[in-house]
Amino acid sequence: MSGIRYRIIRRRVKNPRLEIWGNEIRVILPGNMDPWKVIKENGPWLAKQIELVRRAVELSKRIELVPRTRRKFRSLVERAAREYAKELGVEVNRVFVRRIRSAWGSCSGKRNIVVSAMAQRLPERLIRYVVYHEVCHLLRWRHDREFEDLVRSKFPDCDYLDLQLQAYWIKLKEQEERGEC
Ligand SMILES: [Zn+2]
């Protein structure tokens, strides 16, 4: 795997949308809408995303997965969540590691935090970044400006961290496709 992939997905959605998954650009379309229409209408945004995906693909060739046991990973996630909750003055209920594949993490209305088992072999700083993002959601639900500022105040290099996460995603998928993990 080296280049960028495109995938057209037809779903019962009202509006078309574009999603980036690792090195894959997904065009999600309602009914029989023409994918080229969506691609053309989102030209500038898409061009920027393609450039980011290209950089992530390049970066994925230069990074290494970190050997770490499931147990060490779980305790790292737990500790980071408690530490950040205290720092931000929010209450975290339970912290889980689950086999979710659609995101690095999520949080629920019950104030539970979930981190994907896929993050087990990421560098510690990236794991902490993922956890911090989710703890911030306990303060602000949406990815609005204030949310971004909150994340950026702790991780000023968050744009690069996002790129790294994307690169690790590509790396993990690649290994999975080769049957190595
Ligand atoms: Zn989020």
Image: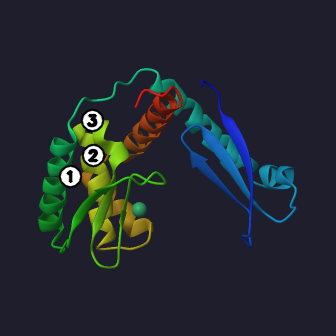
Q: Residue at x 71, y 41 (%)?
A: 6
Q: Which comes sooner in the sequence, label 3 or label 1? A: 1
Q: Residue at x 46, y 51 (%)?
A: 101
Q: Is residue 155 visible?
A: no
Q: Which comes sooner in the sequence, label 2 or label 1? A: 1
Side of 35 where 181 appears, left or right: left
Determine whether label 3 and label 2 are within 8 Å by CB: yes
Amino acid carrying label 1: it is Val
Amino acid carrying label 2: it is Ile
Q: Secondary structure at mark 1?
A: helix
Instruction: Tell me the residue that label 3 is attached to.
Output: 123
Checking the image for residue 141, the label placed there is none
14 over 60 or under it: above or below:
below
Q: Residue at x 44, y 66 (%)?
A: 143
Quadrant housing residue 120: top left
Quadrant of the rendering where the N terminus is positioned = top right
Instruction: Tell me the residue that label 2 is attached to.
Output: 127
Q: Of all residues shown, which one is farthest toward the front?
A: 179
Q: Could you say where residue 158 lies in the image, as x and y percent from the top left?
A: 36, 47
Q: Quadrant of ligand 1?
A: bottom left
Instruction: Tell me the residue that label 1 is attached to.
Output: 77
Determine whether label 2 and label 1 are within 8 Å by CB: yes
Towards the viewer: 66 or 18: 66
- The answer for how far apart the CA atoms under marks 2 and 1 are is 7 Å
Q: Residue at x 24, y 48 (%)?
A: 128
Amino acid carrying label 3: it is Pro
Q: Could you say where residue 82 lies in the image, as x and y percent from the top left?
A: 13, 62
